Image (tube, grey):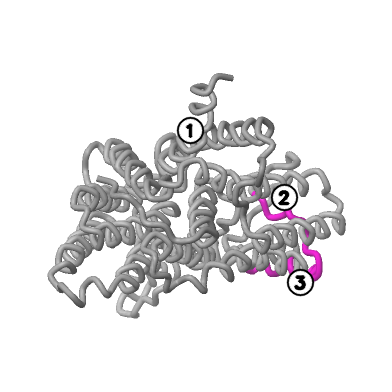
Amino acid sequence: MTNRAVLLADKAGPFLLGALACTGLVTRALSHIAFGLLVLWGLTVAARRPWRPAPPPLPPARWAAGLAIFIITWLAATLAGNNYWHDFQYIAHRVYIIGLLVPLAFLAFNQCPRLPAWLPFFYGLGLMTAAFLTFQAADYRLICIRARAHLSTTGLGFVLSQAIPILVGALLKEMEAGRKKNVAFLGLSLVSAIIAMTQNCTRHTMLVAPALSLMMIWVYRHLFRQRLRRLIPLLALAVAGLAVILSTGGGQRFLIMVESSKVSEVKSESQPLVLNSSDTLRLSLWRQGLAYFQADPIFGQGPAALQEIYYEEDMKRFHAHQVIISVLAKAGLVGFLGFLALHLAPLSLIWPHRRSPDPETFFWVWAALAVNLQFFLNGLTDQIFGLKPLMFIHWLVTAAALWRISRPPQPKPGLD
């Protein structure tokens, strides 16, 4: 290959990673294509270069150890069961994303060190696209249509609660650096996020996204000690956004959490409030998941248990609508230890750097903490472990934080 062809091949990885960040908020199909091409690029680059005299920085060994513990414990749960084929498929599905995305992100970041600084802008572009598509699906009205995203395949509620706090932190970082054009772009992205939230009107998104955004504002509170007026636009945007969301259908989503019981023959008798049917179903699924766990608390029912898939014509398996219960039911206490190792290993590396003086490291550490906290909060009411759109953001942001803390702080040129 000529030098020019080699250069273009090297830059293909950063481009595909940016495409993955953008499309992950819009459509599952395009994000799958981008990730598949990214994997092929990584294999090509790794095969072409002998990495001499020294290999590029790799993900920390502790992260790899957490992944290894997860694989070993879940394979043990598989061998303890009798549904080997589907259990192996389940594990491979997750390892394909987690085990490859972090090393591929490191490889792309090493090829283009400025790429992490651009990722929030790719997320912002994805938010704008998702907002346009959902607004179009609502016939250009601000109403609650439970919109997901293009092709109705991306879990928009989950990725919104991931991306919004990241963009809030990125906006504050750019504000601190005085880059007004970037602040304007990220502000427009957050306006787009409000539109998308209005159409999606998922309850956990309307709770988690503002809470984590407030956390990001709190960690950047030093900006407002110097000039309090900087906080006014953010507060105005937040108040206006919540008012729009709650007044255009979002508020109704909370009201239907309870519903009146059947009308009594005695009209004067006060009517008690009961949980909405969708919430009572969720409670029922939690009980069933716990029953699965109690049947085999050590190894569980197998990693592929509790899936909404027809394995046989007369049998449908379900998911427990809760991450911890699902993990315990699938892989028991053994698999739960592996699950904890998978997520706590990178967090244990990131946490000591939460006060880093380097602006980029500081931002990515808190962005990673935000997406991990989002995973925990949303996981309390939904089974989200393994959802690809969510995992693409979760592990890419975590990889960016791990990459930043794995290299010495370096001054970054402006993005204007």
**Which amino acid type corresponds to the residue marked 3 in the rendered image?**
Gln
SS class of the residue under badge 1? helix
Q: Which residues are magenta?
A: 286-307
Instruction: Return the residue nearer the eye: 172 or 378.
Output: 172
Mark 1 neighbour class, 10 Å CA radius: few under 14, some 14 to 19, many 20 or more: some
Residue at the image position 71 percent from the left and 45 percent from the top: 92
- The residue under label 3 is 294
Instruction: Return the residue nearer the eye: 311 or 272.
Output: 311
Answer yes or no: is residue 249 visible.
yes
SS class of the residue under badge 2? helix
Point out the tag, 1 or 2, that comes first from the N-terminus: 1
Answer yes or no: is residue 259 visible.
no
**Which amino acid type corresponds to the residue marked 1 in the rendered image?**
Lys
Query: Vertically, is 269 above or below 318?
Result: below
x, y percentage for residue 212?
38, 67
Point out the tag, 1 or 3, that comes first from the N-terminus: 1
Instruction: Please give the count of numbered marks on the rendered protein.
Output: 3
**Rendered image: mark on residue 91:** 2
- The residue under label 1 is 11
Q: Nearer the viewer, mark 2 or mark 3?
A: 2
**Residues under numbered marks 1 and 3 in contact, where contact means CB atoms less than 8 Å apart:** no
Mark 2 neighbour class, 10 Å CA radius: few under 14, some 14 to 19, many 20 or more: some
Point out the tag, 2 or 3, that comes first from the N-terminus: 2
Residue at the image position 79 percent from the left and 58 percent from the top: 72
